Image (cartoon, coloured by chain):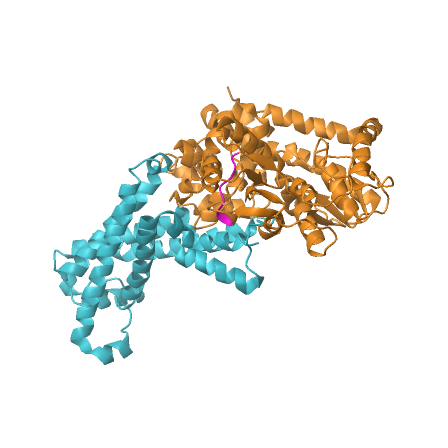
Chain colours: A orange, B cyan
Amino acid sequence: MVTEQEQDTAVKVLDEKTNRQLLYYLDICTRCAICKDACHQYVTTGDVLYLPAYRAQLIRRVFRKYFTLQGKLIPSVVEASAPTDHLLDELYRTTYACTACRRCMYYCPFSIDTTWFTGIAKAMLVAIGRGSTILGELADAAIMKGENIDMFRDILIESLKDTENELKQRVGDPAATLPIGKQGAEALYVALAGTHTILPMAIIFHQAKADWTLSLFEAANYGYFLGDTAKARKIAQRFVDEAKRLGVKEVIISECGHAYRVMNFLYEAWAKEKLPFKIRAVVDVMHDYIKEGRIKVKPGSLKEPVTYHDPCQVGRNGGFYEEPRDIVKAVAADYREMTPNREKQWCCGGGGGLVAESEFDYIRFKGGEKKVEQIRQTGAKVVVTPCENCRLQIDSLNEKYNLGIRISSVMDLVVSAMDLPGGKPA
Amino acid sequence: MDWFSFIVAGVMVYVAVAVFIGGSLYRIVKWFRTPKSPIRQGMFPQPAGTAGRLLKMGKDSFIFPQVLDTDRWMWFFVIGMHLAGIGLFIGHLRLIFEFTPLYNAVGPVVMEDMAAWVGGAIGISLFIAFTYFLLRRFKSPYRELSVPEDYLLLGLILLLVLLGDHLRLTSPFELSSYRDYMASLLAFKPDFPAVIADSPAKWILVGHVLTANLLLIYFPFSKLVHSIGGFAGNLLRSE
């Protein structure tokens, strides 16, 4: 049972975090429900809990009770409500299920941003200990790593020795290195956990003769998914501090949708500082390398039919529609577009940290049905997408719905189409 | 003027207009006094430059292309309702002044015929559109999403439109009588001319004014402020 004190805390968070944008959204939604056809989760389940306007409505009920005249005078007419157990339970299920794709915002006649509501809902839930446990643990682990990096540094560097050897072999250059913590490098590359986004980029950077260095930290930010901005900021700050210390000119974020969004749109507002370096998405960097002729890909070298999935945080919420497409089209002999695509694309269903939360498997697989349908319609055998969450999700959709496809990152696709002295990996 | 009409079609009109203007200003001031988050929305593709942003905001706010893309029937009724609303507003301006150039061009008879036909068509369109909005709310998932306020607002508007339609379609009074009443309101000496005061149709007019008053009073506290804040929402989109 939710205590009165917890209710007060939740309401206080709502009060403190209500800014002008949220106030507009609270006031202007007409509940026309145009958003119902925009949300992959509502469309596939028909459950009102997943209707974007309903997500917002839960917050509006609480807001009206405590902060509006009509909520005080005619509470039942405007459905004003305290954050009851039932309301908080629904809030948990609907906000942590939301993939933050913002397709509803695209279709809303008033451009109401649902993530503004889910963001505040998560902050309220976290404040009263009702946040996602697994996301909380993952966020804490990332912060712990940041605070104890001296303990991890040698292990990390040691673990990358094999990767460096593979790099030397693939590029046929015994002098090739995998620079870590290189002072004064041009760019800091922030990869993902594991080596699958390190080796391909190391090859690409080497071939492009780029002056780069690898971050000790991974790009993923579970604090953001959790909805705890203090933690999210700390997690991102790990490599922000590293970049400042090394004096790099740009920070390149790996193929990870939310990490790019966090760095490009949110971090400066959270930290109230102007970053002294540029934030770049790795697809943009690769696109430049190809355009400038710094790396070469063999046209048409991928014979199988290929399609491209726009990750929400890279496309609609990141602004890269054509760069990754250009790369894929440069390599593919048979490129097929999904419909709809670009700003109207359907979310894969795995965003918002869902792939890490097994308790949301039902909605993750159900919500993914739109993507399954789209992929099937193209008849593609390979799906390329520059976001780890999307890849994990499409991979599990592939397995569950027997799509018979292969999922590739853009960087893997680029490397596979490059003429390397060391040839293909064993 | 009998005491009831005096209160509802007299005093209350001033109260309603004052609450409408004061409340709307209060709402706008409240929006602007609440600190804006520095986080940009970052929704792509983004229109280029301030002119591009304003153009996109205008397009999104007046044409609702996204609604057309999703729900054609809804778009049809929504755009019809808003256009009819504009027509309605313009039509009511004739209570204050004559559209002289038009009047001179077509003459008094055609002018009255036109007002009857256009006004009637607008009134009926509004009734159909709002009925559609109301019926739509009884269907899932709109039903689950709706709050009592939604039905009350639609009910109030439907009543207002119905009474207005009655006045328009049965024409119990001449335009000049309405103008006399309007002039008395503007002179802060609310009174009905004898033709209205002595007619039983007076009560239709009083009911029309009463529902209009209630709508004006509730407006700043309802979702109807989307007519002001919607522009802000659509401008934020391209930030």
Q: Is residue A379 left or right of residue B133?
A: right
Q: Can see residue A85? A: yes
In this rendered view, identify the residue nearer to me: A136 or A69: A136
> Eyeballing the image, is B10 above or below A159?
below
Q: Main secondary structure of the magenta part?
A: loop
Give the percent coordinates (x, y) of residue A103. Answer: 49, 44
Q: Can see residue B38? A: no
Q: Is residue A346 magenta?
A: yes
Q: Is residue A221 left or right of residue A76?
A: right
Give the percent coordinates (x, y) of residue A22. Answer: 52, 44
In this rendered view, identify the residue nearer to me: B130 or B78: B78
Give the quarter of the figure containing the C terminus of chain A. Answer: top right
Residue drawn at the location 24% of the way across and 52% of the way down: B127
Instruction: State the image quarter where residue A393 is shown.
Output: top right
Residue drawn at the location 27% of the way across and 46% of the way down: B132
Q: Is residue A12 left or right of residue B106?
A: right
Give the percent coordinates (x, y) of residue A39. Answer: 45, 39
Give the percent coordinates (x, y) of residue A89. Answer: 48, 25
Residue interval drawn in magenta: A343-349
- Name the residue furthest top: A1
Instruction: State the image quarter where residue A305 is shown.
Output: top right
> Eyeballing the image, is A369 above or below A183?
above
Q: Is residue A237 magenta?
A: no
In this rendered view, identify the residue nearer to me: A37 or A227: A37
Residue drawn at the location 61% of the way across and 43% of the way down: A302
